Image: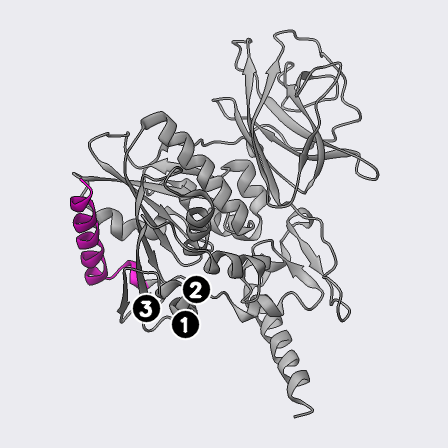
Amino acid sequence: MILQKPLKYVCLVFTVYALFWLQGCNYMSIPAHDNIITKPAPSGSANAQATYNSAVIKGSILSADKAKDFTLVMAWRTGPGHTGISEHVVVNDRGRFMLYLPEGRYHLYALTDYNHNGVFEQDEVSGVYGSAASPEEIVVRKGELVTGVTIRTSISKSPIRMLPGKPDIKDHVSPILQRTYNGQVLKIYSDYFSLPNAQTGYWNPTAFMKAFGANIYLTQAYDPSKIPVLFVHGTEGSPHNWIYFYMRLDHSRYQMWHYYYPSGIRLPLAAALLNEAIGELHNKYGFRQMALVAHSVGGLTTRSFLTRFASDGQNAFVKLYVTFATPWSGFSMADASQVITHKSIPVWLDLGTQSAFIVQTLDAKLPPHIRHYLFYGKNDRLASDAALDERVVSCAVKTLGWDCCHDSILKNRDVFAEFQNILNREFNATK
């Protein structure tokens, strides 16, 4: 009995380091600003606070300049000990941007590459959030999403203000351009959804956010006569995971949408970004009903979205919720990862069995108008018993087990046939 606790701790530590060894170069390539460095906490004290990218500022550029000059948005961190550039991104061709940042206080500046040399310089400030004379400060906290930020840029080729310091941006324009936007039509086999990009979203979410942000993509132009079915991937996933569903879905009645996001970010933030993306499309199209479908950790993201942002008065158009192979109870490996000094990534803070996220998300009830069907694999070694957490099973309309593993459940014809039957039955009832 004396050796029981030390032995358990050693096993957990070995498990964590075994994971790191298997991940190899991916693990070692996590950049500093995506890192969480945690240390063993003294008995009775909280874990050491870590600085890492954990929040998003989302906004747009309004410009009277008709020229197609590249514009960059820079977040300049203020406050004692933090003065200087924190993050930057080149806006897309629709003037939209997402900045993925640590919590803190920021001034936002727009820089326009007027001399077309591919480098943004201290004297190329073309706009300021607030005013040039008095920049407005934005305060963001961990897990927070700040939206509705608008920066107006000048048509003048001369700077309206100098930056507080040298930007020291070595990126050229093309590598950091946010290439996609919410509601964009993309084929499901688009290279944007490739496995390397999906892995980047997990191990280096900052790089993913620079290139893609977190958006919903349509597989065809919006059709008001068809019901949106929104698919959400899990860890290191992308819309490619749903290719078999795409090939078999009744496209005469349903339109397939995808939420593509960096799976390494905190799950409450992923849920908030999902809520924002859905809200934008609903405001634009006014659809009256929708199905929400998720795989693996995507089920935790979507349940967080539904318990926090869906009610009779908000997002009430989400009628049907279907999940596949979700590890509802989290992973003990993620618990172990928080008790030793190591490199980590933000999402691991939410995936532990004792994490505040797991407790809050599973204890919260789904809105009464949501009908949840839970699919799980009987041979799923990854989700294992976590796929049948009683807090979730007890509220599901139906729980369906299949002779599948964690990934093959999305390829099985019988599984899809049952899913299609559920779609048809549920939406016939709400027609």
Front one among 9 and 220: 9
Image x and y of residue 25, in percent: 59, 59
Looking at the image, tell me whether mark 3 or mark 2 is earlier in sequence order: 2
Inspect this view and state whether residue 200 appears: no
Task: Assign the N terminus to one quadrant of the image.
Answer: bottom right
What is the spatial separation of the Cα atoms under label 1 and label 3, in whole angstroms?
8 Å
Looking at the image, tell me whether mark 2 or mark 1 is earlier in sequence order: 2
Report which residue position mark 3 lands on.
377
Q: Secondary structure under badge 1?
A: helix
The correct choice, above or below, for 12 with respect to 274 in the image is below
What is the spatial separation of the Cα atoms under label 2 and label 1, in whole angstroms?
7 Å
Image x and y of residue 35, in percent: 66, 53
Question: Label 1: few (<14), some or many (≥20) within 10 Å?
Answer: many
Task: Write down the quadrant of residue 185 in the picture.
Answer: top left
Q: Secondary structure under badge 2?
A: loop
Report which residue position mark 2 lands on.
327
Looking at the image, tell me whether mark 1 or mark 3 is earlier in sequence order: 3
**Numbered range of the magenta stretch:** 408-431
Query: Majority secondary structure of the magenta segment?
Result: helix
Q: Mark 2 touching mark 1, by CB under 8 A?
A: yes
Image x and y of residue 101, in percent: 64, 40
The residue depicted at 64 percent of the width and 88 percent of the height is 4
Does residue 405 appear to the left or right of 6 in the view shown?
A: left
- Amino acid on which the number 1 mark rests in the picture: Ser
The residue depicted at 17 percent of the width and 39 percent of the height is 431
The residue depicted at 32 percent of the width and 68 percent of the height is 377
Report which residue position mark 1 lands on.
384
